[in-house]
Amino acid sequence: MLSATTVFCHDGVEIADVACRHGHGRGDHLELASRHALVLVRRGCFVRSADGVETLLDPLLAYCMNRGQEQRFDHPHEHGDDCTALFLAPELIASLWGGEPTLPSATLPISPQLDLQHRLLLRAGRSEEDPHDVLERAIALIAATLAASESRRVASGRPAGTRARRALVDGARELLAAAPERSLPELARALAVSPHHLSRSFRAGTGHTISRHRMRLRTRSALERLADGEQNLARLAAELGFADQSHLIRVIRAELGHTPSALRALLA
């Protein structure tokens, strides 16, 4: 009747494809939410009862659930529904939601732009290539969705002033230069700022995302190794944090317009 397939899990965020094939009628029983989550509907509609309130959900509305919350799901139609659940660690929620590790109870409107962002995120999660890029996109989607409820709470972690934002970007660049594998939440914790605002400030200051910056650092390291005559691309990919040899080749070709073997010949 209900199945959930995890398509991505990294550093406090898990993305699951949830399919419900419950027939028309009232839900069988109350369920206890085991984790915090933001849930976006992709197809169908259903009624969620929680905290004494019944809410009709469809692809134009999202909802949140908090760990330990009792809920029941009723189905006005046959054929069930499909949703995307973004399960969140409490500390990540607190960093995005003004220090409070409890998600809002009100439903959240989903604009066409947010819906497309959500579906592209689900596709990216299934690609199994760059988890840092998927994580950064997931945090951006979560923050944008929560802002529909209380934008001031989401904005509370924003650095004040141009100088503060520049210092924040420089701090992230410094940390990434030493350890490119640091994730967005790890960087945000080290810099005492919201991961959402770190991501936005970094993009505004550099013109690209943190995940793109990380990949470019890896590309520079690969160039250095290729110039030294590195022959084993599989080893190079594994040691520099690429998904596999094919991923390394694609990234280098996209960034530099040449394959690793061609670059090795040019740099020899």
Image: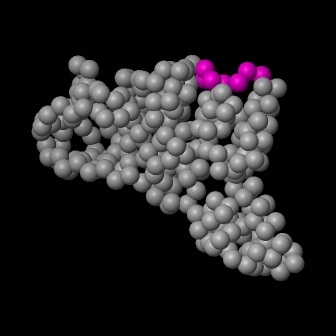
What residue appears at the point 50 percent right and 36 percent down from the top-left corner?
A: 142
Where does residue 86 sit, x and y in percent of width and height? 42, 41
Taking the magenta stretch, the answer to whether it contains residue 161 is yes
Q: In the depicted view, which residue is nearer to us: 222 or 50? A: 222
Q: Main secondary structure of the magenta part?
A: loop
Quadrant into which the C terminus falls = bottom right
Name the residue rendered at 83%, 80% in the picture: 265
| Snapshot quadrant of residue 239 | bottom right
The residue that appears at 87% across and 74% down in the rendered structure is: 267
Asked whether residue 58 appears in the rendered view, the answer is yes
Q: Is residue 209 visible?
A: no
- Left or right side of 250 for 146: left
Q: How many marks?
A: 0
**Residue at 73% in and 46% down:** 176
Judge left or right: residue 259 versus residue 124: right
Residue 195: horizontal and vertical position, in percent?
Answer: 61, 34
Q: Is residue 132 above or below residue 261?
A: above
- Estimate the x, y position of residue 244 in percent, counting from the top left: 59, 68
Taking 258 as reference, is 141 above or below it? above
* Residue 155 place in picture, x, y as percent: 60, 23
Place residue 187 in its image quadrant: top right
Give yes or no for residue 152 being in the magenta stretch.
no
What are the residue bounds of the magenta stretch?
A: 155-162
